[in-house]
Amino acid sequence: MTESPATKPADGEARPRVKNGLKPERNGLVKSLRRCHERQPKRHCHPEEEEVHAAALNGGLYNRPFLESFEETPMLVAVLTYMGYGILTVFGYLRDFLRHWKIERCHIAREKEEQKDFVPLYQDFENFYTRNLYMRIRDNWNRPICSVPGAKVDVIERASSDYNWTFNYTGRVVQEVINLGSYNYLGFAENTGPCATSAAEVTAKYGVGVASTRQEIGNLDGHEEMEKLVAKFLGVESAMAFGMGFATNSMNIPALAGKGCLILSDELNHASLVLGVRLSGSTIRVFKHNNMQNLEKLLREAIVHGQPRTHRPWKKILIVVEGIYSMEGSVVRLPEVIALKKRYRAYLYLDEAHSIGALGPRGRGVIDYFGLDPCDVDVMMGTFTKSFGAAGGYIAGKRELIEYLRSHSHSAVYATSMSPPVVEQIITSMKCIMGEDGTTIGLKRVQQLAGNVVYFRKRLQEMGFIIYGNEDSPVVPMMLYMPAKIGAFGREMLKRNIGVVVVGFPATPIIESRARFCISAAHTRDVLDRALSVISEVGDLLQLKYSRHKIHPSLTRTCTRTSTTDEPLLS
């Protein structure tokens, strides 16, 4: 577990360190604190943890404790994981040898004999992992569903007779599968209620497609209303929307930075951000995940040395971070990033794809979570695909920024306008969160999500699983490590009517395969208890309870939280 002032403060002030003898790990932060994370310091907790709590509150930049857990991989588990990948690799080369001599049939795409002298279209070595490792557990991905992605889903059953190279539908539907994989954080992905009703009415009036760009004849009154509402929701001057969340990053960053600019990117940024910074043509330097010392070092070097060879000052320095990192479950150390940004006069690009709607007492994202001023973030990006149950993304900030992007962004100039029912889904769900629909349903969903996250994370840690991320993050990675357990966990969970997402290399480091749970406000306490019971059962079956920091339920339940999550879970 980490707390911000234990690391070097971004504002340079001298502050007391927590004397707990903890070991700095790969992101330069203090880790592996025993898990008594109270919100109020005067509770039944250990002295060293009270010291951490006080330091987190008195650090100056944070108005709340900032606690994250990244327990180190046990040595034996790491060794066995490497051995597992080594054995798979050896057998992979053996099978490739058999395929070369036509002893074993290969279904993978490859060059035709008559094209053997052409430049290769398929890189054989790059496909080695796909042929020999991914195919073994391919049945854990791309599972088709035939229902709304709510708290429970219906999954179409598939079967394979050729070891996952192809699939056939059995005609059976697995019903009432508890959904722990969708990004439906606030439960607005539903087919009943005000959002679905409004979207249906707009579809009857406007149709589904606009068949034009915003700059031509595809600018509807709904688009204008949505963008004004987004700006109001975020507390900024202006905003603009795009039809695809991935393209919101990949097509707008090149419009904001170019040759002669420097982009400082977190090493765990999403692929859309990575693609955007590469397309910009800017110089790219990557800093360690959430490591403020490393970020400050790069900023200082950029200011001192300037551009390579010429040593001229950079035209622009842009820091690119995410609100919640979707594989780690960690939250950006935004107060420190903003302090560094101000000190070195850089610009800040914040991707709130997973945090908007899911963090903060009002659901306004990581800025709301830390109680910061939205004006301190130069470019605010987010998506409507998760908390709002819709599609697309947005860029928000100063009016001059938005007007510039309207004429220079490829996503704005060339992309087709957002579908009217999708726009209406966004408007209705956002008004619900803001309370402009005259109800408190939106606020209750935000509180429900916060309560669900705390309950789910605590219970998993009590069971002995290694959990990554921030204590308030709805993205909950649970470590699996060994390659054989990736497929086994996904299959065993589905047998027990629990749908989960499992992730392995290359999406994660090779020894950090994991299951990633996404918690929703649509989950009731009964649903979570059922899921936790099954996770514990499968964890015992596969021996996944690796944590060496055992937490006693009696200890964690004496600790309380803020009023935001003290409310009882909604039924």
Image: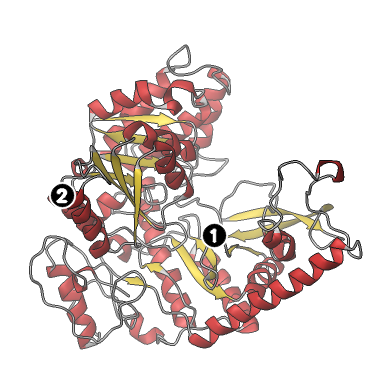
The residue under the point 18% across, 77% down is: 41
Query: Circle 1 is placed at which residue position?
Result: 507
Nearer to me, 560 or 14:
14
* Quadrant in which the N terminus appears: bottom left
Q: Can you give x and y, in whole percent of width and height, for residue 364 in the image?
A: 31, 46
User: What's the amino acid at mark 1?
Assistant: Ala
310 with respect to 214 (left or right): left
Q: Residue at x 18, y 62 (%)?
A: 62
Q: Nearer the viewer, residue 244 or 280?
A: 280
Could you tell which of marks 2 and 1 lies nearer the N-terminus? 2
Relative to 301, say whether 21 is above or below: below
Image coordinates for residue 223, horizontal then vertical, percent: 41, 23
Q: Is residue 25 left or right of residue 61?
A: right
Outermost residue, top side? 217
Q: Say which amino acid is labelled 2.
A: Tyr
Does the image show residue 439?
Answer: no
Tag 2 and tag 1, C-beta contact below 8 Å = no
Rendering coords of residue 473 (x, y %): 39, 61
Residue 443 location (% of width, % of height): 34, 49
Using the image, determine if residue 418 lies above or below residue 560: above
Q: As drawn, which residue projects farthest toward the left? A: 14
User: In the rendered image, which residue does mark 2 sit on?
Assistant: 344
From the image, state whether disc 2 or disc 1 is nearer to you. Answer: 2
Q: Secondary structure at mark 2?
A: helix
Dot 1 falls on a residue whose secondary structure is: loop
Give the Cα separation between the discs numbered 2 and 1. 33 Å
- In which quadrant of the rendered view does residue 222 lie? top left
